[in-house]
Image (cartoon, grey):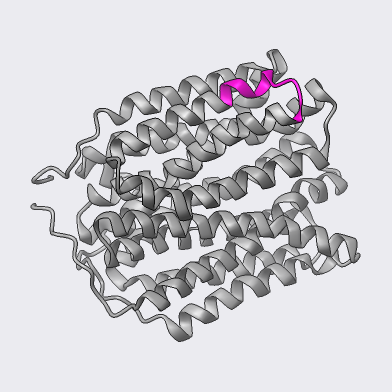
Amino acid sequence: MDLPARVPQGNVSPARFGLLHAAVFLDLVGFGMLIPDVQLRAEAMGAQGWLIGLLLASMFVTQLIFSPRWGAASDRLGRKHVFLACTGLSALGMLVYGLHDSLLLILASRLLGGLGAANVAVANAWIADLSHGEDQTKAMGRLAAATTSGLILGPVVTSVLAQAEALPWLGAVGCAFSALGFVLVALFVPNTPPTAERSPGRRPIIDLRILSDLPQLRSMALIALVAWFSLAMLQGTFGRLIHLNLGYGQREFGLIFGYESLLEVVAQGVLLGWLTSKIADRHLLRAAYVIQGVGLALTPFMPDLLALFGASTLYALGIGLANPLVNTMCSRLTPEDRQGEMFGTLQGARSVGFMIGPVLGGVLFDAAPAAPYALAGVVCVAAALMVRGIPEKPSTGSP
């Protein structure tokens, strides 16, 4: 089957494109509000560390199973319907989180959040439908910037609610943010025509058939998995590392996290478009992974806060450039009628990294605090080497 040429379709104007970015941003604000609260709330209810880990991992297990299915459904039904369904589930998950202090409700909230998380994958497929070439890379970068910006603002809103002694309203406020994004897309962004006419057929529990049908995607999916695995090891141990080495706490953690997130937004929203006009995507992705790996490997050896900011600069620029580049390269290797399925599968691969990374990172940290960062650095360099085997253009056919 020949890969069809990518042509813009539908009638989504650039302004409405911006509304799609805004909807993703608003949903991620709501999601980000829960990040600093889930562990503390579960711990206050008496959950032990292993149970807290299972609660956190449950969302990514759900993503692994359902994101490819949602993506494939968006190919058959059109992006808007599936995007709205996912965003509605995401909003419902936040509402459930705020209903009552119960570990079962936290689990239900995480499962609903995992079901709805495919809205980001569907948004990427929507952008792939409506853009091409350098414009596609820039659009992917802006969507990634919207995602990162939402994750930055979410914990800030939680902090404001905590200072106002309004944390019982956390779930309702998060739901309101996500619901506003739902309304923007429902009212102002038209649907695009379906890109696939296939019957869904019988699917396995974890549907990775696109990786079998399109062999050129396998390496990209593995690259996405290992890169997010390195990110998950950092997020799972960084607070412990800076406390052990430098005696730092939540304040310094927040400063560094905010700085890294801001750099990612700049890299995705500003630098990426300029760099891709001068450097081929494949070469830029290799450089991004090397920079990311160097920053990770240096982190445990930084003697003070200023030096930590230096290592964080390398890491944040690398991850900020790498994520939208992977999305763009995968999109170019995928037929138009399977874009949603591909982005859902890619999100599932990243979820695997987030399930494995914190567990292995914690074990390695207990053995030697620098070990997870050394492994993460090696993994990023390995990902850079793997990029060398990715074709510049899609193959002429697939099974």
| Residue under the point 20% across and 68% down | 197
Query: In the rendering, at what x and y percent does residue 206 appear?
Result: 39, 46
Query: In the rendering, at what x and y percent does residue 289 appear?
Result: 43, 31
Name above or below for residue 18 compared with residue 354: below
Q: Is residue 164 magenta?
A: no
Q: Quadrant of the C terminus?
A: top left
Q: Nearer the viewer, residue 182 or 144?
A: 144
Name above or below for residue 361 compared with residue 334: above
Residue 297 visible in the shown view: yes
Left or right of residue 288: residue 94:
right
Query: In the rendering, at what x and y percent does residue 87 appear?
Result: 53, 69
Q: Is residue 298 magenta?
A: yes
Residue 108 visible in the shown view: no
Q: Main secondary structure of the magenta part?
A: helix
Bounds of the magenta segment: 296-305
Left or right of residue 291: residue 41:
right
Query: In the rendering, at what x and y percent does residue 394 appear?
Result: 16, 45
Q: Nearer the viewer, residue 276 or 227?
A: 276
Q: Nearer the viewer, residue 52 or 396?
A: 396
| Residue under the point 34% across and 24% down | 385
| Residue under the point 22% across and 66% down | 196
Name above or below for residue 93 compared with residue 268: below
